[in-house]
Amino acid sequence: MKVENTSYRTIWLSETDDRVVRIINQLALPHSFETLDLRSVEDACVAIEEMQVRGAGLIGATAGFGMYLASLQAGNETFVQDLEHYAEKLKSTRPTASNLAWAVDRMLTKISLGETKTEKRAVAKSEAQCIADEDADFCRKIGEHGKAIIAEISAQKAGAAVNVLTHCNAGWLAFVDYGSATAPIYAAHDSGIKVHVWVDETRPRNQGASLTCWELGQHGVPHTLVTDNLGGYLMQHGLVDMVLVGTDRTTRTGDVANKIGTYLKALAAKDNGVPFYVALPSSTFDFEMRDGLKEIPIEERSPDEVTLVTGLAKTSGEVTTIRSCPPGTKAKNWGFDVTPARLINKLICERGVCDANEEAILDLFPEKQKK
């Protein structure tokens, strides 16, 4: 995607030193655009943990490049032990997104095929790049499949703008390129279909307000920022044609873990007859899990994210953090909730569109049938 007409991915190897991984620092957005260098697996862990990078696909890609950096750090005599240690460090950074462990395990498997330490490091570099390229390509394909859905709604509306409600940021910034939930929006917009996006702020970290609005603006897609709780009102008054969200982990039966508040959007959509779609690359499926509510680990984050708010001060123009509640107020901050498959109309992935149930999912992924 483009930032001020310059093409960027969210993560890439430095053009001048292939031992350095570069990322867009999402903590600086939307008020400034800056990049950071990751030079060690510890840097990669910090980037994931502190949300300099975030989003299922980008977490996976960062973990892949993190394992490449780990291979450079691992000692020649203790290479395997060091690599396994670094792998566990990366896996422990954030528990909910399935792409994280998937990418680390994929890297470990590929690296083990190299015979010498030099070969193993070369394999690590190649496979990390492959994970990133694959993520971008899968999101591009999600865009094409999802565009057909938006085009159908557009035709039913005689070309009037299709109103899409999003939640959190499942955009270009959450993946390597294109995004999952935003990919169909970008594809539709670029092909001349009129699209308007309702962007909810997504408390407590406001990724909708700070990230989704920023990237939609960069791409020229019409959008309006709304409060998290406005979604039901919009649906009751016929102002939403479809809800389109991403996911951090999806079970083989179609249950979806996504940013906290997604479940409430799905309930409102069900009550108002608004179709609810979830976009995801295949790496976000967890084919070992069946019951999302019982099995998906839900990350609990710092209460500071709830009690403190960071933004650009209106008078000074400086980025500042303020407390929004009385001192000493207790807060809870679960980062995700689970939307049961029964509330989801369709899943959109790189292989196509399917119902949110085990039979339909396995029709797209027959290799995941249990013997």
Image: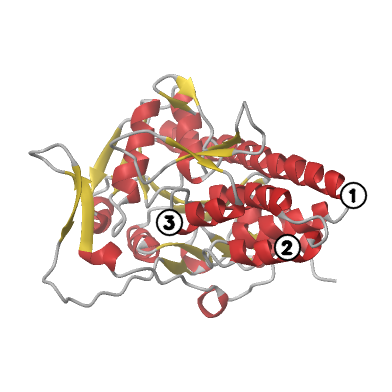
Q: Residue at x 77, y 62 (%)?
A: 368
| Marks 3 and 2, the one that precedes in the sequence | 3
- Does residue 104 appear in this view? yes
Snapshot quadrant of residue 158: top left
Residue type at mark 1 is Thr
Marks 3 and 1, the one that precedes in the sequence: 3
Q: Quadrant of residue 363?
A: bottom right
Tell me the amino acid under the disc marked 3: Glu
Query: Residue type at mark 2?
Result: Asp
Percent from the top left, x then y, of residue 231? Answer: 27, 54
| In-front residue for pair 126/357 | 126
User: For numbered disc 3, what is the local secondary structure?
Assistant: loop
State how the image is colored: secondary structure
- Name the spot of residue 133 as percent of width and height, x first: 67, 37
Q: Secondary structure at mark 2?
A: helix
Q: Is residue 160 visible?
A: no
* Within-10-Å neighbours for mark 1: few <14, some 14–19, many 20+: few
x, y percent for residue 73: 69, 52
Taking the view exactly as shown, the residue that stands out farthest to the right is 115
Q: Nearer the viewer, mark 3 or mark 1?
A: 1
- Residue at screen point 39% across, 22% down: 4
Q: Find disc 3 in the rendering and name its residue.
A: 50
Q: Which residue is mark 1?
A: 116
Say which of 46 and 178 sits in front.
46
Position of 113 compared to 61: left or right? right
x 60%, y 31%: residue: 14
Q: Earlier in the sequence, mark 2 or mark 1?
A: 2
Q: How many marks?
A: 3
Identify the image quadrant of residue 34: top left
**Quadrant where the C terminus lies?**
bottom right
Q: Which mark is residue 82?
A: 2
Q: Nearer the viewer, residue 180 or 276?
A: 180
